[in-house]
Image (cartoon, rainbow, N blue to C red):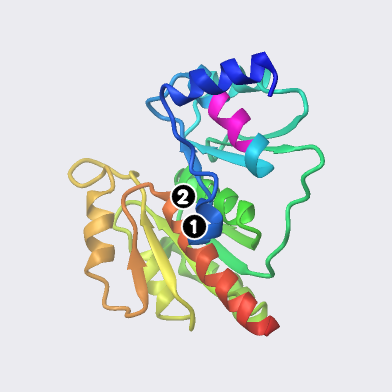
Amino acid sequence: MSDLNHERLEILEQFARLDVHRRERTGIPEAIFAEGKTPDQVTRMLDSLAEKSGYALATRVSEVCAQYALDHLNSKLVVQHNRAGRTVVVRLREYEPKSTGGKVAILAAGTSDLPVAEEAKVTAVVMGCEVFSFYDVGVAGIHRLLEPVETILQKEISAAVVVAGMEGALPSVVRGLVPIPVIGVPASVGYGYGGKGEAALMSMLQSCSPGMTVVNIDNGFGAGATAALIANHVAASRVK
């Protein structure tokens, strides 16, 4: 190890201990939650994780943090910044992402739910899944669900992430129409009382559509990871 790399590793270990074997152990890779960290910390963690694993994912990345990473990351890394989803994915140039064969659907009730939906999408893609996205398909215009439901059935999609703010009705409706697990994500979108995602969370928790599970408010990463884990297990079982 060069003196420079050794020094960088020592600095990194002062504030982070990266779990580089998490994907092998749990099926879900280590992800860097950028919120609350300095741009320099996030960049060092991305750099180190990619060097060890071939790739790295950071979520909740601000524009300032993303620009700092773009300016300071190792030049041998390929960087993908999803502004809508507030994610940064980096990989070594020689690293080839592998497809698992897993298929996931991402549905968002409204355009305001896009950041959470895109975080879920990026997460599932990083985990090797093919993702089918359907945005602005909320219950106010329920006819818009015809195309997503048809695609889910035709493409043999294994799990769906459904993001909704306001009263959070969409995941329950979707679960009542498709024969796959649905992960509901309450989004912090709405007016006044309960408008920060609390109303959507309570509605989803009280769903009368069995087979639906719920993650915390705005947790696109958790939803995308869960859906991908399900889809990857289904894909692996089909190969056997």
Q: Nearer the viewer, residue 230 or 54?
A: 54
Is 225 on the left-hand or right-hand side of 202?
Answer: right
Residue 48 magenta: yes
Crowd rating for badge 2 (residues with CA inside 10 Å; few <14, some 14–19, many 20+)? many
Determine which residue is flagged by label 2.
Answer: 221
Local SS, label 1: helix
- Marks 2 and 1 sit apart, C-alpha to C-alpha, by 6 Å
Could you tell me which residue is drawn at 57 percent across and 53 percent down? 121
Residue range highlighted in magenta: 44-50
Q: How many marks?
A: 2
**Residue 23, located in which quarter of the rendered image?**
bottom right
Left or right of 96? Residue 145 is left
Q: Main secondary structure of the magenta part?
A: helix
Residue 64, x across and y down, in percent = 53, 18
- Check residue 138 in the rendering and tell me which mark sits there, or answer none: none
On whether residue 73 falls in the magenta region, the answer is no
Amino acid type indicated by mark 2: Phe
Residue 140 vs 110, above or below: the answer is below
Picture coordinates of residue 33 (x, y %)? Answer: 44, 36
**The one of 99 and 199 positioned closer to us in this rendering:** 99
Q: Answer whether residue 89 is visible to the viewer in this image.
A: no
Location of the N terminus (image quadrant)? top right
Which quadrant would the C terminus be assigned to in this image? bottom right
Read off the residue under disc 1. 225
Q: Is residue 66 above or below residue 173?
A: above
**Residue 185 percent location from the top left of the image:** 38, 56
Single out the residue that lies furthest toward the right.
94
Check disc 2 and report its element: helix, strand or loop.
helix
Asked if marks 2 and 1 touch (Cβ < 8 Å), the reply is yes
Q: Residue at x 35, y 51 (%)?
A: 165
Identified by mark 1, the residue type is Ala
Can you see residue 235? yes
